[in-house]
Amino acid sequence: MGILAAVNRVYWHEFFFMLFAGISVVFAVCVLLTQNIVRMAFYLVLSLGSTAGLFFLAGAEFVGAMQLMIYVGGTLVLLIFGVMLTAQQRYVKMNTHPTDWVLATIVGGSLLVLLIGAAAGVDSWKDASASKKALAELDVDDARTATPLGLALTGVRVDKLDSDDPALANGQSGYLLPFIIVSVHLLVVLIGAAYMARTKRSATAPVGRAERARLNIMQMEHETDDVVYSASKQSSSSLLDSDQSQAEESTDEAQE
Amino acid sequence: MNLQQLIKQLANDSTESLSWFLPEIVLCAVIMLLLLVRLFDGKQRLDLWFVAIAGSVVSFLFSQPWLVCGGGVERTEIFTGLLVIDGFTIAVRSIILLFLVLFLVFTKISGIPDSDDSPDIYTLVFGATLGMCLMVSSNHLLMIFLAIEMASVPSYALAGMLKGRKRGSEAALKYAIYGAGAAGVMLYGISLLAGLTSSAHLPTIALQLAENLGTMSGSEQLVLVLSGLLISVGLAFKLSAVPFHFWAPDVFHGSCAEVNAFLSIASKAAALGLLVRIGIGVGYVPGLEQEVAQDVEAGPAVVAGLLPVAEEAIEPIEDSVEQEVTVNEALQPVRDFIGKLIALLAMITCTFGNLAAYSQTNIKRLLAYSTIAHAGYMMMAIAPLMSSLGSDYGVAEGALSGLLLYIVVYVFMNLGAFAVVAFLRNYIASEEIADYSGMIRSRPYIVICLVLALFSLVGLPPLAGFLGKFAVFASIADAFRATDATYLLVLLLVGGVNTALSLYYYLRVAKIMVMEEPAEGVDIEQYPKAGLEAVYLVAITLPTALLIFFWNPVHAYVVDAVKALIS
């Protein structure tokens, strides 16, 4: 019984907030302190994962789920794979220069001071009992944010129905347009990524103006970047490309 | 109101909005078409340039620039307040789409991208243009961010368009990383602003600010200022304003002149349009003055009719007049903050751009710094707009129409300069200014066009650049006379000094091309003859040279375009 009473006395919301906030901050600091890239990525997973916990605690279940799916599930797994596939011995360790530390401390520290000052300046946030009271009054239905969000993305703002302030209700826009237009954006970006990743197709028959422009650019590249090309012999693609264009150039000259 | 009514409202609103959204829809359709046509073209590769140029012309026609004439377009919010259509939107959108048409012709003549790459590159160009059209019509913080990203991300890929080149890839990567950083900072500022005002809809934000500005605590004001600064970081990056300009010279040097033209003109025009949208959106509640004017007109008429209702009706009207006037007066601190911030950025940007251009030996880097300087000149027009928006509408209109005029002029003169750089690269395989020496003997037409474009960039009369600069500086002088604010006088002086500064490095290029002997060992006879290139350049340069004769209709057009925006 003693244990149960003790369990009841703990204010669990605060406890979990401290827990998640602590994990998130500690591992964020770990990201800074470690020099191994793979470990950095793993610490980032933990830090961002516990940030999702903070979102759940704040009643933003949708945002929390998105945080888990996008950052922890998507971006970071991609990051870890990228690191694992590309990191060779000498690239695994990252050494930060002391002057970088000083600069980063100045910039980051001043931002931190500014933000803490701003956060501590809001009067309504200082009263701890008020937030407890608000939490006790919170209806569980209020926390179901996924449905109104989904409806808002199709253009219907159901939260308009029970908004008190008519001045604000006017500004509640449905998000149908961004929802649709972002798909065009993603398509374009996908094509851009495919274009960047693809190697240049072997040149078709010379088509006058276009071919001349391309060759001229390649020629400029040889004049100015010779040193660079010889220095980066590992990158076979650029060598291949320049060899090819040299070959094309010589045939072009022969034709003339 | 219940759910059914909401859905019915949405359906009505969406169908009405679509008729204003046709240019963007055409752009989306062209993107699809560019991808789909390739499925069916079999062995012989169709040149998709024809699809692109047809799409851009149709899109330009759908943007209906003639609607603006006579000030016939009223402010309309579409898509439940996400976008706003008025004369300014239509004018800037038409300018961007007209530039797209000219740009596509330019790429066809210069030969970059070749027919292999062109579908992908044109898809990216159309995607970026779509984002730019949304930028100038944004009325909501979410759309602002989305539109900036839609315009930026394809630009990152465009910067690395020529593959297998170290410098091009470096430019693209630098641009992408700096851009992502700036977007993150801007998003943070947007979240602060939305959190403070509990809305993301710009006019609602303005109303909330007007209501709460007086009672805000010190720390809340600090957060408000912070959000303004953070948002300005993202915008300054798009505008390549100092201190967020460092990407511009590297990106311009690394990517080809065609992409430079696109980034330097379309992207700047859209970013300035967005700057105006945010400035007016947050610092001014539109439509109120119109009501006031109507009330005033209606007032005497009702009295003259001696209707018994009149005396009852007049009282509430007077109340509303008082309330509405104070809303825009209460926003004066917001406008002052935006105006002074932009004035400061503009002065630094302009001076830095002009000074850094002095030591450049590469024409693309020189034009990159010149782009930075011109972004500064154009941002200067925002300061008088903000300072006189609530008090003197004539001056505010003058500033905005001056900006619009500058953008129109800038499209032609900068496109001319970059087109010359691209064409000369095709002839002599060099972009170093020293290699241009004595060029006038071998290709007089091209050199004359470049010299005219450079003189116009300086702002020498009687070229078009002078008219743009004069309109902007005159509006600053007007605003100074109206408000007596010292910073406007400083702005005017800095602008004048900068124009004199810029004379030297533009004229140096002209001098090298015209007065110096060709380099030894260069046989000017071996160059191929300019055909289409010369025709295109003359067509681009003619508006720059002859605008002074058609000054009145153009000026009337830009004044009409801004009329409904602020009065």
Image (tube, grey):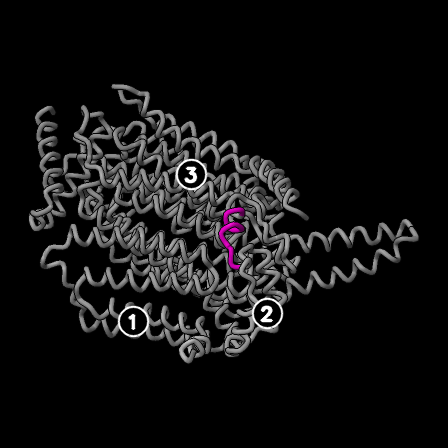
Foreground: B441 or B355? B355
Q: Secondary structure at mark 2?
A: helix
Q: Chain of mark 2?
A: B
Position of residue A130 relative to residue B227, above or below, is below
- Quadrant where the N terminus of chain A is found in the figure: bottom left
Q: Earlier in the sequence, mark 2 or mark 3?
A: 3
At horizontal 53% and vertical 56% (from top left) the residue drawn is B200
Residue that badge 3 annotates: B99
Q: Amino acid at mark 2?
A: Leu
The answer to whether residue B155 is magenta is no
Badge 3 and badge 1 both on one subunit: no
Q: CA distance from mark 2 to mark 1?
A: 38 Å
Q: Is residue B159 left or right of residue A137?
A: left
Residue that badge 1 annotates: A26
Few, some or many residues within 10 Å of mark 2 (<14, 14–19, 20+): some
The dot on residue B213 is: 2
Q: Amino acid at mark 1?
A: Val
Few, some or many residues within 10 Å of mark 1 (<14, 14–19, 20+): some
Specify the segment rendered in magenta.
A143-151
Q: CA distance from mark 3 to mark 1?
A: 52 Å
